C-alpha cells in the first residue's frame, strides 16, 4: 500500500504506523518540505515549470476537473493530490480539510481520482484499524 503524505500530517504518528503496519510513504519532494522517510515520486508535468528528464509525469484530462474542484489558484494543492493519483497511491493523507475534504470536495475528488482515498491521519488510523 502506498500512502501520500501532505504537508502538516503528523510525521511521528505516521512513522509509527508505517513500522506497525508496513506501508510505503511517498511525496513529491519539490512540492513540500521533504519527509526523510518518504520515497520521492513524480508530479504532474507543467509546461513552463517542468524539466525534461525530471520526475514529472504526464497528466490526464481529469486534471482539469481537479482544478475546478480545488480552485485554479491553489496550484500546489492540485499538484499534491494529483501526484498521489499519478503514483497509484491508495491514500492521500492531509490535514487541509478546507481544500480537500469540506464542502463535498472529498466526494468530488474521489469520483475523479478513484481509487485514491482522501482522508485525515485520524480517519486513516480508524480505517486501517478495522
Image (cartoon, grey):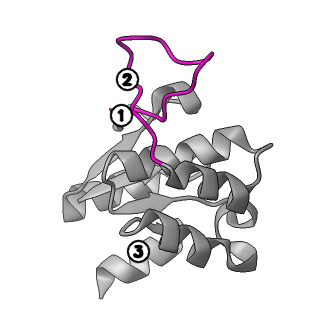
**Between disc 2 and disc 1, whose residue precedes?**
1
The rendered magenta stretch, by its main secondary structure, is classed as loop
List x then y, in percent, for residue 124.
Answer: 43, 72
| Picture quadrant where residue 87 is located | top left
Q: Is residue 79 visible?
A: yes
Residue 119 in view, yes or no? no
Q: Magenta includes 106?
A: no
From the top left corner, tell me how far across and down residue 117 is, in percent: 43, 69
- Magenta stretch, residue numbers: 39-60
The residue nearer to you, when weighing 48 against 130, is 48
| Position in image of residue 77 (x %, y %) | 65, 46
Q: Secondary structure at mark 1?
A: loop
On the image, the x and y values in percent for residue 38 come to 36, 38
Taking depth in this image into account, of 62 and 107 the one nearest to the observer is 62
Q: Quadrant of the C terminus?
A: bottom left
Residue 127 against residue 99 in the figure, above or below: below
Q: Which residue is mark 3?
A: 125
The residue tagged 2 is: 55
Please report whichever mark, 1 or 3, sits nearer to the chain's N-terminal start.
1
Amino acid at each position: 500500500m502506498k500512502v501520500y503524505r501532505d504537508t502538516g500530517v503528523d510525521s511521528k504518528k505516521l512513522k509509527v504506523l508505517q513500522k506497525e503496519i508496513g506501508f510505503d510513504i511517498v511525496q513529491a519532494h519539490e512540492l513540500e518540505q521533504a519527509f526523510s522517510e518518504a520515497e520521492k515520486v513524480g508530479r504532474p508535468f507543467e509546461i513552463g515549470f517542468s524539466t525534461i528528464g525530471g520526475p514529472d509525469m504526464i497528466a490526464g484530462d481529469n486534471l482539469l476537473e481537479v482544478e475546478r474542484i480545488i480552485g485554479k489558484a491553489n496550484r500546489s494543492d492540485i499538484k499534491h493530490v494529483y501526484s498521489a493519483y499519478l503514483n497509484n497511491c491508495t491514500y492521500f493523507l492531509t490535514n487541509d480539510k478546507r481544500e480537500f475534504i469540506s464542502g463535498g470536495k472529498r466526494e468530488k475528488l474521489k469520483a475523479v481520482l478513484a481509487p485514491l482515498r482522501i482522508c485525515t491521519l485520524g480517519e486513516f488510523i480508524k480505517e486501517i484499524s478495522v
